[in-house]
């Protein structure tokens, strides 16, 4: 169920969808590089444990967060998807 009805969310321009897509890829790359620097210095069991620990931290922050910032498993609502190869969703 939605916490907010989808009709009550204002629509945003499609150009912001592209901006969000590019920004999300850039931020994910930066975070992955930072985490990679910390993880790849470890060997053996420590490598596996730190990898699982970061996975659980990121899962809690984005899926199980107490403030429901990302919508959990439902995802963000009301953000248009940009057309891909001229195809609309």
Image (spheres, grey):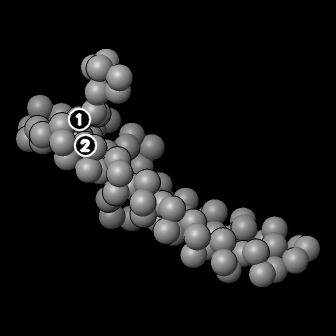
Asked if marks 2 and 1 touch (Cβ < 8 Å), the reply is yes
Quadrant of the rendered structure where residue 83 is? top left
Side of 25 relative to 2 (left or right) = right
Give the vertical position of 29 relative to 53 (above or below).
above
Residue 6, percent from left and from top = 18, 34
Of badges 2 and 1, nearer the viewer stands 2
Q: Nearer the viewer, residue 42 or 23?
A: 23
Question: Residue 10 shows which numbered tag?
Answer: none
Q: Quadrant of residue 46?
A: bottom right
Q: Image quadrant of residue 74?
A: top left
Q: Nearer the viewer, residue 85 or 56?
A: 85
Q: Earlier in the sequence, mark 2 or mark 1?
A: 2
Give the total number of marks visible in the rendering.
2
**Residue at 49% from the left image edge and 68% from the top image edge:** 30
Q: Quadrant of the N terminus?
A: top left
Q: Residue at x 25, y 43 (%)?
A: 17
Seen from this angle, which residue lies furthest top?
87
Element at badge 1?
loop
Picture coordinates of residue 2, whole percent (x, y)? 27, 38
Which mark, residue 17? 2
- 36 over 60 or under it: above or below: below
x, y percent for residue 48 = 81, 68
Residue 80 image label: 1
- Judging from the image, what secondary structure is the residue with disc 2 in? helix
- Report whether 52 appears left or right of 45: left
Q: Is residue 55 left or right of residue 14?
A: right
Write the residue at 27% across / 43% down.
Answer: 18
């Amino acid at each position: 169920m939605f916490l907010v009805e989808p009709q009550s969310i204002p629509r945003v321009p499609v150009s912001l969808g592209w901006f969000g897509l590019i920004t999300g890829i850039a931020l994910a790359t930066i975070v992955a590089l930072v985490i990679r620097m910390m993880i790849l210095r470890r060997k053996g069991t420590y490598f596996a444990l730190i990898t699982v620990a970061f996975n659980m931290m990121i899962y809690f922050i984005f899926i199980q967060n107490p403030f429901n910032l990302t919508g959990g498993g439902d995802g963000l609502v009301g953000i248009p998807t940009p057309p891909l190869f001229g195809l609309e969703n």
